[in-house]
Amino acid sequence: METTKAHVLNCQFSSWYPKFKKLTPRARILKPIPPSVLNYLNQDGIFLGGSDDDENEDDGEIKDEDDENVQRARVSAEDLKLITDTIEELGGSVVPKLNWSTPKDALWIAPTNSLKCTNASDILLLLKASDFVAHDLDDPFDNCKDDVVGKLTENFSYELVLKEWFPIHTSHEYRCFVKGRKLVAVSQRDPNYYDFLEKEAPEHLELLIELSEKLHDFPDENFVFDAYIQKDRAFLIDINPYSLTTDGQLFSWSEINKLNTDDPVLRLVPKGPFGSSGSMYSENRVPFDMVAANLGGNISEFANSMQQSMAAEEKKDKF
């Protein structure tokens, strides 16, 4: 199954958000992404914040940065302030993402084990630790049939998206597959079994069908969208390419491609020995002791140190 660069670009947040703004939680798009943030994300390794003026000195000897176990991030005070102001504009708590991906696979490094970010360092830490975000930066068109290597469109730029955070029940998250502009499949996203979902499923499916019908202005007839059910409303959370690079969740892509467009299939995690599989993206997590050893301390200390160093840099540049 192949896709095109145009389809992938249609699925980036800034392409669809203006059209469907009323269907999704509030968000702000920093486009292009602040330059020092992009530089930070493109550097190898996970490292602490620091000042551009810092020198790598030890006993009077200047060392090459590559010799240091802990490198310094160089996010400018101006860019940090832009992020901070945007967080405040959205109520003080946000969920970050780039053009396509949210760093859900990086919760292992978040002190709160949550995507909720209340400051710039929370955001940078999650983005930097995410394989999904790294894919956005390194190879977003890897499954496209057209030749796109090194040929991004002239008006393309990376974007930092900050979405208003609100508490959710993960049991009410769904991934929805649209084929020929018809909803054909809906999958529960949380990998755990919930007995109450069986009773709620018919109502949820109706809400998701209604939401899918409001997405007819999306330029492609095949696409995947993520939704969240809250009471009697379905919220649009994200739009993803109709591609093997998008997780089919409880469906295989061969199943999805064979499904009839008349009757959408809703699939829930079944009750039984395989009805609870823990957290999503557990394969992206690493042992805590391994991370702690590599960082020379524990995750909490690492995150706190990063926050303090970035705050110090921002304060210093104000004077």
Image: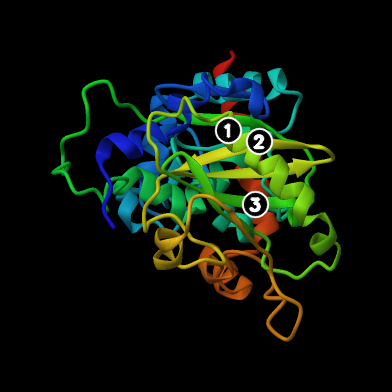
Residue pointed to by mark 2: 210
Towards the viewer: 272 or 29? 272
Image-based side of 125 in relation to 16, left or right: right
> How many C-alpha atoms fall within 10 Å of the one at disc 1: few (<14), some, or many (≥20)?
few
Towards the viewer: 238 or 157? 238
Mark 2 or 3, which is nearer the eye? 2
Q: What element carries label 1?
A: helix
Q: Tags 2 and 3 in contact by the CB under 8 Å rule?
A: no
Towards the viewer: 237 or 284? 237
Q: Earlier in the sequence, mark 2 or mark 3?
A: 3
Q: Which residue is drawn at 59% across and 74% down?
A: 287
Residue pointed to by mark 1: 213
Image-based side of 269 in relation to 7, left or right: right
> How many C-alpha atoms fall within 10 Å of the one at disc 2: few (<14), some, or many (≥20)?
some
Q: What element carries label 2?
A: helix
Q: Residue 245, percent across and down? A: 38, 56
